[in-house]
Image: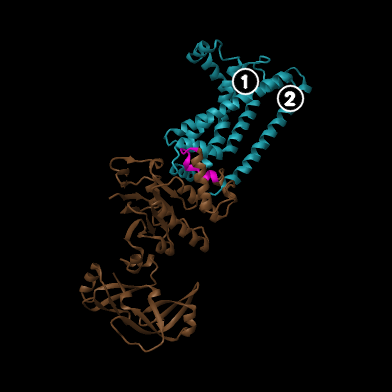
Chain colours: A cyan, B brown
Amino acid sequence: MSWEALWLSVKLASLTSVLLLLLGIPLAHWITTSRWRWKFLVEAVVALPIVLPPTVLGFYLLVAFGPRSPLGSAYEGIVGTTLPFTFGGLLVASILYSLPFAVQPLATAFSGVSPRLVENSWVLGESRRRTFFRIVLPLSKQGIMTAFILSFAHTLGEFGVVLMIGGNIPGVTRTLSIDLYDQVQALNHRAAAETAFFLLLLSFFFLSIVTYLNRNQRRVNDGTDR
Amino acid sequence: MMELTVDLQYLLSKGGALQVRFSVPLDAPRIVVLFGPSGSGKSTLLHCIAGLLHPAQGEIRYGETIWFDAARRISLPPQRRPAGLLFQDYLLFPHLTVQENIAYGLRRWNRAERDQAARRWIDRFHLTGKENRLPLSLSGGEQQRVALARTLAPRPRLLLLDEPFSALDLRTRARVREEVRQWVREERAVTLLVTHDLVDAMTLGDDLIILSEGAMLQQGPPLEVFSRPATPEVARIAGVENLLPAHVVESSAGRVVLAVGKGRLIAVGELSRGERCLVAAPFSRLFVSIRAEEVILERGEPAQSSARNRLTGVVQELIPVGAQVRVVVDCGFPLTALVTRQAVEELALQAGAEITAVIKASSVHLIPG
């Protein structure tokens, strides 16, 4: 197992998960509170990566961030490099690819907070925004943890998008799952078995935590809300 | 004079509408009780006033301030209405301690003031030693007191209480009831209190509004509403045990003779204008309402007088109700009396026994049919 690939995977997954929380919390809040009639379309777009072949997403990202696209040339103008085949490109792709894994647990958690607790906060004089920070967010702690862990685990295991947008550059874009693929290609079955088993254990560990958290969530939300 | 004026129509999701119109003077502390069976729209009304629900029509004004006006599309958000709402099921914030819950509405106060105020409420509501507990670990009565303290702490000018005592046992209920009354007086706040409990209504209300299926049926001082209900429906809601169809046999100044079933009853006293119209025409149909507490049972010879109705009858049924017994007597019509257990023994009351029922003529109240 390559330590370089492991380090890259962990770095990518951590950054992706943190940025996804910052992006996902306002997005999930909007989804749970908005009454816009076309909201379902936004929800569908957010959920798209679940069913979309990763290569399709990767392809469009390549097109969107290519040097000839306005988005790509704007990025190049600011950062100095193009997005594809860099760590930055990998990060953008990972965020989009794991978006539903962050937004959906968050939205579920937010909508699980009794709207009457929220109304009670309004009557006590707190604005909608402050109510969100004082009531909804703390009561969604488990949902936030779940969102973080799921995006982390999902990013760790992504393959198609990484290959499409990042390629296979050691230390820059070669993550664990790409490394595993290389090992199999090189008929290095011993190393492949190690990497595969490690990824399996890690995924199992994360999912156990998520399941455990969600078991406790039900108990907490029973609260004083009869 | 400053007044809270409520005149609104709210379409209920189960069909029908809540339609109310009343005003409450704001110059003195006062408790207005909204009384009625469940599903009559009482809670909905409080939510409209708090700003959580938007009526289809009408307006809500607090003194000079417009809180809601459907025609002008004005609706002040709940945060900007100086009203405190105590929800029926308390809704304490489960992740905050007792002290944090109580201080929740005081964020804009400085820290020292906030802590001091919270401490005062903790002492006042006997929560000392529990300030760092989470709501889930409190008893029902304690949760109720925390919720009440949290509502009162920001010093709302208008207090909206939705069934505040419904989850309390009888003894706690009496004590908390007294505390609420005292608080309203001390803070000089005007309170709207929703209840379907007769004792709450009688003991707390300065003013009483009877609501049923979204409609306001009667408004007045509780004693008057309960002893002189304006319609048979109010009498039923107010728990009047004797509500009997009757018609007028004769009427002279301030004295009316009524035929009730096979018996006769005399009603006297200050008649309201409605009552005077009613009895003007002989044989007009109406209802007689008599509270069971006003019926006295005794042994002895019946003799009519203008001040008392004395009726002989046969005991039909004895129904124990707590410390008292409800006695149904057939005296040409079924008449229910409420007497003590002691009286049942002394009068040797049992089914089939003969007994005399005495009702003051002024306790016989007439309702249009």
Residue drawn at point x = 45 percent, y = 39 percent: A126
Subunit of mark 1? A
CA–CA distance in space, label 1 to label 2: 17 Å
Subunit of mark 2? A
Identify residue type, mark 2: Thr
Q: How many marks?
A: 2
The x, y position of residue B315, in whole percent, is 43, 83
Q: Is residue A125 left or right of residue B56?
A: right
Q: Secondary structure at mark 2?
A: helix
Q: Is residue A158 above or below residue B321?
A: above
The x, y position of residue A192, in whole percent, is 75, 23
**Which residue in the structure is indicated by mark 2?**
A195
Mark before the other along the chain sequence, 1 or 2: 1
Q: Are marks 1 and 2 in contact (CB under 8 Å)?
A: no
> In which quadrant of the rendered image does the N terminus of chain A lie?
top right
Which of the pair A120/A48 is nearer the observer? A120
> How many residues crowd around disc 1 within 10 Å: few (fewer than 14), some, or many (20 or more)?
many
Q: Secondary structure at mark 1?
A: helix
| Disc number for residue A162 | 1
| Disc number for residue B202 | none
Which of the pair B197/A167 is nearer the observer? B197
Residue drawn at point x = 58 percent, y = 37 percent: A141
The x, y position of residue A93, in whole percent, is 57, 21
The x, y position of residue B355, in whole percent, is 41, 85
Identify residue type, mark 1: Val
Which of the pair B291/B187 is nearer the observer? B187
Image: magenta residue range: B99-110
Asked if residue A47 is among those painted magenta in the image, a careful observer would answer no
